[in-house]
Image (tube, grey):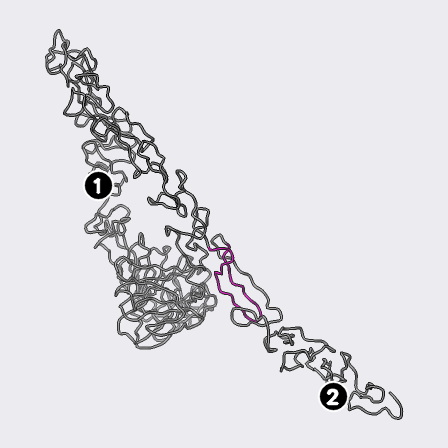
Amino acid sequence: MDSRKTSSAPRAAVVVLLFALCFLQGAALRAQQTVERQDFESGMSPWEEHQLDASSYTYPGDWTIESSGSHPTCSPVQGSYMARFNSYTADSGAEALIASPALDLTGAEVAECRFYMYHDTGSSASDRLYFAISTDGGSTYYVRGTIDRNDGTNGWSEHAFPLGQYAGTTTLRVALVGHSAYGNNIFVDDVRITKDVLPAGSEGKACGSGAECDSGICSPDPAGEGRCRDDLPGHDCIDGNRVAVSAGTVTCYLDDVATCTAKDTWSVQSCYDDCGPYLDVHGCSEGQCIPCDDFACSVIGDEGCDPDAWCEPTFGFLGQCRYKKEDGQSCGANKECLSGNCALAPDGVKYCEPAGTCAAPGGSPAATGQAVCHNGDLYTCQGGTWSGEDCYRNCGVYADADDCVQGACVECATSCITDNDCKQGIPCVDNRCEGNLANGQTCTSASQCQSGNCVDGVCCSDLCTVKCYRCDVPGMEGTCSPVPAGQDPDDECPGQGKCDGTCDGSGRCQYPGTETACDTCARCDGAGFCGFWVAAGTDPLDECPACQACSGTGPGCAPVPAGQDPFDECEEQPPESCGLDGECDGAGNCRLWPEGTPCGQPSCHEGLLELADRCDGQGLCADGGEADCGLYRCADSSSCATGCSSHSHCVDGAFCDSSGACAPDLPAGGDCGQVWPGLDRSAACQSGLCLPDFDGDGYFCSPDAASCVHDGTVYQPGWVLCVGQFTHRTCLGAAGWSDAEDCSPGPC
């Protein structure tokens, strides 16, 4: 990646290096509000990936999302996924970027971008990552920092880049640009862009006087705006990012060079440069203005040239910028003219002319309707192009006319002065051409010919009425001869459209065969008709729209059956995009991923399930909504539990019953014996107390430890219940029921 400024069109993106040295490890912000976060857990969107100059490399650079890393071996710093730049396999010098959407930094005074990058010492190659920004919609990027993969450490490191000078804007985009040195892969994860408002009086806060600052010092930033500055060593100036720097620091402020020349003093140098016919530049890199890129331009779209210039090819797609030409100057294409109109003159030379006009010989403009003569023919300007007319006239016994004078064709003479004014061999008598013409001479009537036959504009040996014969065949004028093959001047071999016939050079007609297309999926039948149909399900000439093929029963196409793509016309996009699934839909269109296709990951937290987003069948990823797990807790990070074998699988206020289902905690008297085998019965009671029944058959919930239970009924201490006819048991409170006692002297 070089340090030139270039336009992104027509390439996906071209990144310009602008490395602000002082911010490689910028101070952390408080990050009160997250503007954008890319953790790669749900794909790359809304970020975009672009390969740079991919056609220049056998193995171009590329970003992909991975769950585990190799070369070096690593795992995501958080979550399940991370981004990888393939510098292990990409050619040295190959680059690719991933770029954020436009960032809303309004309402902020400071902003920053933080992300994690994996460093390793496994390869000494200088693979590196550029941190870049764009303010023009992603057409041009300027680098704000460079990070080496091999920095002498191994493992994940967090990097921060301040963006305070763009606070209050909505057009900033950030990008991570991978640069391969054919070493090891580069991994990044958890990219966060945040914004904040500084506390009153703190360093970097806007101020009008020192009284507004905790330090008492209000220092100008490169734009001349007051910023609070702490009175600390190395805190001599406040830069555009609201960060303190020392005297002598040279940095980039927006697109210009800013130098802290002394305490509270900035010198700002404009980096705008008029580069002549080349694209003007206004950018800063490594504390220096970006120079004009006047080495080469791209002939595709005239990339690299000013709007008033064009790219003249010199080698392949490369060229040199040239200023566009004024009207009247010779040109080769519309883009060479300021008017955008490079018009062809009748003499074959092109000239720049005002839009909508034609070019006359010599380069003067001609308006619509204006006529000029050239080489004996007449040319009339019609809507910016010339319509030519051959001025040849068959003048019978008079000499044929074939000239143009002052914007009009010369007409046939009606009188003569000398024999030269008549056809060869015809004398001029009393100012009239009189006599009979020999065969082969041009004529207008039979009376002018010795043979008495004026056929096809020449005197002929006979009337020549045979099909595909004429009397004016070049080289055979005056004799009835076969029309040359491929011609049919008298339309004697009629046919349908492109199946129209011609003479074969032997006096017969010939017609196009089945190799000639005469309609969509239709071919000529060799007899002049468009009646041969291309086989159904095929499309050898690519005549049908995507997902359609020839019908086989007539001209035209029919939809390809759903689920097929015989001509590989439908791009297969990932399901999470909700875009095309790579097959046809049976109605003549590429099919979208169907409604219900997952396009996002579900998540579950504290019993609330965020359902997976699903495609709506119309190309959009619809919010899946949320669902309460009810009495169950989350089974994992993406789903609710649907059964239990422990009370911990249920929410507070519920227990795991004997069927393996979560049920609401039971009130006093509830049967708490029906819990999952081996689990605490008391957990099934609202009171937390599950006591054995009076008769030892089961367990029931008790409201307190001093009560006893029997078949769901609660009894207070001292209560006596009979056991059969001759014994009883007494509620002893916390001690439960007493042992059975005799009912002496009689029955209970």
For the image, the number of numbered tags is: 2
Please state if 45 lies on the left or on the right of 702 as rendered: left
Query: Where is 387 relative to 578, above or below?
Result: above
- Residue 433 visible? The answer is yes
Quadrant of the image for the C terminus? bottom right
Please state if 472 lies on the left or on the right of 533 as rendered: left
Please state if 585 lies on the left or on the right of 239 as rendered: right
Looking at the rendered structure, the secondary structure element under dot 2 is helix
| Residue topped by disc 1 | 332
Find out whether residue 610 is within the magenta segment.
yes
* Kind of residue at badge 1: Gly
* Kind of residue at badge 2: Ala
Report the span colored magenta. Answer: 593-616
Please rate how many residues cluster around mark 2, counting C-alpha atoms within 10 Å: few if below 14, some from 14 to 19, many from 20. Answer: few
| Residue topped by disc 2 | 734
* Nearest to the observer: residue 378 or residue 130: 378
- Give how far across and how far down residue 260 sits, in percent: 31, 67
The numbered mark, 2 or 1, whose residue comes first in the sequence reads 1
Q: Residue at x 30, y 71 (%)?
A: 184
Q: Which of the two discs, 2 and 1, sits closer to the camera?
A: 2
Residue furthest to the right: 746
